[in-house]
Amino acid sequence: MTALNELTIAEARDRLAAGETTSVELTEACLGAIEGAGALNAVVRATPEIALEQARAADAAPERGALTGIPLGVKDLFCTKGVESRAGSRILEGFRPEYESTVTSKLWASGAVMLGKLSMDEFAMGSSNETSVDGPVVNPWGEGLTPGGSSGGSAAAVAAGLCPGATGTDTGGSIRQPAAFTGITGLKPTYGRCSRWGIVAYASSLDQAGPMARDVRDCAILLGAMAGHDPLDSTSADVPVPDFEAALTGDIRGKTIGVPREYRVDGMPEEIDRLWADGRAMLKEAGATVRDVSLPHTKYALPAYYVIAPAEASSNLARYDGVRFGRRAELAPGDGVTEMYEKTRAEGFGPEVRRRVMVGTYVLSAGFYDAYYNRARKVRTLIKRDFDQVFADGVDAILTPTTPSAAFPLGAFEHADPVQMYLNDIFTVTVNLAGLPGISVPAGRDARGLPLGLQLIGRPFEEGDLLNVAGALERQAGFVARPDRWW
């Protein structure tokens, strides 16, 4: 008998509907798992009182919503009313919003239960979940391994059975990379599909909320509740939200899958190349046509991303100054407002955030704006045009590896050039630059037994088709492994 905290969202929903369990029982099982998983450091703020109150309300509800009674974790980037929301940063210590993010509001309106806030890289800047003020998150697949970032707490919590699903955000791969490292499924929707209102901003033209869960069906269920137009977000798309779960027909006959030549990078590990070849074979076996395609500007994506994202971050993070909310540094006699800004930001921001803010300020400065930022924006346009041409040529989805390796040890890049860490985003940043949907599906394991993911990239606002192709890949891969409990 599967433990209640190990159920998928769909399984839990069906058991609740059949009266075989209650939301209180599900919630207590997850809270118990959280209490016993302190070594993972995935949950930074459990909210048992709120969770049990919501669970009791769900059990008493006369009508059931899409997620009634389902316990979920929330990445600490989402503002949650009355619950500290600090985005992994010291500078937001004590910040308890008076409002709820649109995405979490939609989840609670659908009947979901909030278990607590999940760890993340500070302000979502990182690929290993080591930059948080709360310390590193540990991958449940191995003591001392990173779960990826920035949504590492969400990925670790789902993989370890602390919650059946969680929210994540993805600016350059922050849902898909940790999903691949922890053997779960993570979906980055089309830019504008989910509202950004109430989510602490990193790079506003790239950030997108999305679901993280154990399988494709659960991601479809979560996305249906999270998505929708929001007049509070000027970048929110006014497009219908289809029934994503109903799109999972399992039939991908007649679909054309593109394999981009440019993603075959120098030094790619043999096991990643082999997994990619296996993915092509799996999709052919499921009835799809697989052919090579070209995305010629891919090689410029990473440098363009690491100009645009820090530039937007330097602007977005200017609001954290110790005046209106969050932490304020102690001042010496005679200090003025300038000293307050300087001391507060120096104490409140970690090294990686300071690095990116300085890079962003530099590329936006007089004399460098055209040389760096404007050039990066032009490259971004070319990258999107590459995808548009491939999709116009009849390709329905694009298959790539999600990451260039399996999970690496915590601290592996501590003394390395920061660019070495940034290379973990090499397969994922193009999707954000082009505003497309992308999903990572666990599809194999490396020689050490660690999970590896394959990425599928879809047409804009065609998440239903993308999820259906991902479901077919998931069935062919048959990945059912779960980490052995060591924590």
Image: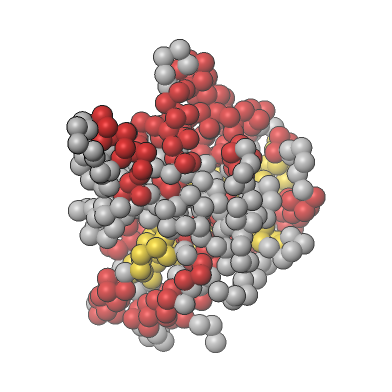
Residue nearest the viewer, comparing 239 with 368: 368
Colour setup of the view: secondary structure
Confirm whether residue 122 shows in the render: yes
Q: Is residue 50 above or below residue 266?
A: below
Most extreme residue toward the top, as rendered? 367
Residue drawn 34% across the image and 74% down it:
69
Q: Quadrant of residue 84?
A: bottom left
Locate residue 270 relative to residue 362 in the image: left or right: right
Q: How many marks?
A: 0
Locate residue 195 relative to residue 160 in the image: left or right: left
Q: Quadrant of residue 182?
A: bottom right
Residue drawn 74% across the image and 60% down it:
446
Task: Point out residue 290 in the picture as x, y percentages from the top left corner.
Answer: 73, 46
For the N terminus, give its image quadrant: bottom right
Q: Is residue 361 above or below residue 197?
A: above
Task: Point out residue 53 in the picture as x, y percentages from the top left corner.
Answer: 25, 75
For the C terminus, give its image quadrant: bottom right
Residue drawn 43% across the image and 33% down it:
357
Residue nearest the viewer, comparing 193 with 352: 352
Task: Point out residue 245 in the picture as x, y percentages from the top left corner.
Answer: 47, 61
Task: Point out residue 198 in the picture as x, y percentages from the top left corner.
Answer: 30, 48
Most extreme residue toward the front, as rendered? 333
Residue drawn 39% across the image and 42% down it:
349
Q: Is residue 18 above or below residue 120?
A: below
Confirm whether residue 58 shows in the render: no
